[in-house]
Image: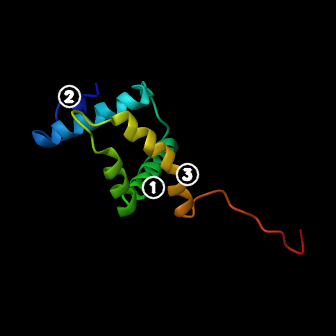
Amino acid sequence: MRHPAIRGRWLGAGRWEEQRLAHLAAVASVTGDPVPPTRVRVTAAVLAAQVVVLADWLASQDDFVVGQLEASRPQAGEPDIAGHWARTLTAVPGLLMGAGLGLPQWEATPLS
């Protein structure tokens, strides 16, 4: 949240900036506001980008989005960000398995 690109509004202004900052604050609140690394190797940055793309694909599936929206409807006042985060973490193993991304299951063969 302290990065010059965010404070300098190079990533957009107006409503886009409001939503971006609200999402960033919500993620920071449920992840404990981790301190970002001072340096990142290129290979680590590429891997992180791939994980983000995969996570976006998994979490953008219609069934998952609808289920999360139904479970996240606030009773009154502010949405329950921590509850949403907990439900998402609970759903991740099922999302991974449903996409065929679980650990491989090796079958016994006559040669093994």
Give the secondary structure at mark 1.
helix
Which quadrant is home to the N terminus?
top left
Q: Which of marks 2 and 1 is in front?
A: 1
| Residue 34 x %, y % | 43, 26
Please determine whether, in this image, residue 2 is positioned above or below residue 64: above
Q: Looking at this rendering, what residue extends furthest in the right direction? A: 111
Disc 3 versus disc 1: nearer the observer: 3
Which is more N-terminal, label 2 or label 3?
2
Task: Compute the Cα span from label 3 to label 2.
Answer: 36 Å
Q: What residue type is labelled 3?
A: Pro
Q: Write down the residue under mark 3.
A: 93
Q: How far apart are marks 3 and 1 (CA)?
A: 14 Å
**Depth check, front residue: 85 or 13:** 85
Q: In which quarter of the image is the C terminus?
A: bottom right
Please tell me which residue lies in front, 103 or 74: 74
Q: Which mark is residue 7?
A: 2
Which residue is denoted by mark 1 in the rendering? 54
In the visual, does 96 lie left or right of 82?
right
Pointer 3 or 1: first along the chain? 1
Picture coordinates of residue 97, whole percent (x, y): 57, 59
Q: Residues within 10 Å of mark 1 (few under 14, many from 20)?
A: few
